[in-house]
Amino acid sequence: MWDVIIIGAGASGLMCAIEAGKRGRKVLVVDHAKRAGQKIIMSGGGRCNFTNLYVEPANFLCDNPHFVKSALSRYTQWDFIAMVDKHNISWHERDHGQLFCDDSAKQIIGMLLDEAKSAGVTVQLQCEIFSQQQIADNHFSVQTKMGNYETKSLVVATGGLSLPKMGATPLAYKIADHYQLPVKATRAGLVPFTLHQAQKEKFADLSGISFPATASCEIKVGKKTKQISFNEALLFTHRGLSGPVILQISNYWQAGEALTLDLLPKLDLLQELLITQKNRPELGLKTLLSHQLPKRVVECLLESAEIISVPLKQYNEKQLQQVADLFHRWSPAINGTEGYRTAEVTLGGIDTDVISSQTMQCKSVAGLYFVGEALDVTGWLGGFNFAWAWSSGWAAGQVA
Ligand code: FDA
């Protein structure tokens, strides 16, 4: 009989295992993958954006915005940084407080596996899970390819649906369903957008071009709507739009709703046009705009709005306003997202109403825990999803 079986040797599962092991619990981690923490290894372009200096509950999407507060405040970014420092892993800060390894994400998984080993944790990889049942309160049986195991606590840390090629499965939602626990509708998050065919063809030539922009969309807060905006780099791709600004807004944008992009967030373009028209009336519109944005972007946008570039003196104010609106409030024809194939995270998941925010234990099934991305908690881009994995895994590891 194990004290704790954790399904999933990813970020949250390993953190939970370390903490439970340190308490003297007999811990087994099972995972069907060949390697532990595959998403950690590929994260942050191979350098793992392992946390953020400014972790706040406001950086997370969850139907109950208070749910994340307890775990985040008890295991903070500083606690994780202390572990990284203890293992002499050098790191650096990038924009918006994002922390990355100087060398390799492999150092983070190495650190977690070292800690797990020191805490006496057993990790069983390539272990397919066939089924699990609750035999009594705090007593579960887990059937796997490697045999049947019994445990007092069962922790589900199998993550979300993104990157099915890397071994993502809906096991957490199936286990929730088995115990009749509600699951909030899931969809791909932190994901690039695809454009409708006509725009896709028009803008495909811009693939690879990147510059700062502000993306905005409307979100519902209770009965009201409010605007949410992000200001980061925009990237044109062969299929549509990506870059940090798109990944961030993709967590909030709902299919069929408008997305607005300000391509010149630091400029009052109408003022610039009016002043230049007065001072340099012979200057062509395209030339002026090409001082602010890559020329090909200017050409494509003007062409898409059927605006012909002529010397500034030939435009009236209404026409200049139309140009300013085009660049400050561009509304691309979004077809959808690239889906779980390229998404970094899954929005939605196990309804947090049925989970204790202190312990991650299921309120109706004694001894059953859910941690990490499997829950209806999604962080912004910037190290917040790992921050949640560490904090929620840590919280369950104190009691499981
Ligand atoms: P995680 O996905 O880490 O682990 C789940 C484990 O369960 C896996 O090992 C899997 O094999 C196993 N499993 C699944 N189904 C199973 C089954 N049926 N049987 C047995 N085992 C099963 N976040 C961040 O903060 N900073 C970053 O830099 C990045 N970068 C990034 C890049 C890419 C490409 C992706 C896809 C994601 C990121 N993320 C990120 C997000 C981050 O990786 C993610 O939110 C956490 O890894 C979630 O941790 P979990 O422990 O919940 O799941």
Image (tube, rainbow, N blue to C red):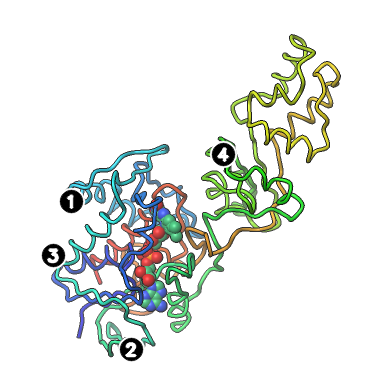
Amino acid type of the residue tagged 2 in the rendering: Gln
CA separation, marks 3 and 4? 45 Å
Comparing 341 with 69, the one in front is 341
Mark 2 highlights which residue? 143
Left or right: where 70 falls relative to 120: right
Reading the image, the residue beneath label 3 is 118
Sooner in the amino-acid sequence: mark 1 or mark 2? 1
Please give left or right for residue 236 compared with residue 69 in the image. right
Q: Which residue is mark 4?
A: 210
- Foreground mark, 1 or 2, reads 1
- Mark toward the start of the polypeptide (3 vs 1): 1
Residue at image location 64% in from the left, 56% down from the top: 254
Depth check, front residue: 287 or 330: 287
- Of circles 3 and 4, the one toward us is 4
Sequence-wise, the earlier of marks 2 and 4 is 2
Number of other residues with Cα within 10 Å of mark 1, as a class: few under 14, some 14 to 19, many 20 or more:
some
Q: Position of residue 26 (x, y in %)?
A: 17, 76
Q: Amino acid at mark 4?
A: Ser
Q: Are marks 1 and 4 in contact (CB under 8 Å)?
A: no
Q: Is residue 384 visible?
A: no
Badge 3 crowding class, 10 Å Cα cut-off, few under 14, some 14 to 19, many 20 or more, is few
Q: Secondary structure at mark 4?
A: strand
Distance Cα–Cα, label 3 vs label 1: 13 Å
Could you classify mark 2 by the number of other residues whose Cα lies within 10 Å: few (under 14), some (14-19), or many (20 or more)? some
Where does label 1 land, which residue? Answer: 87
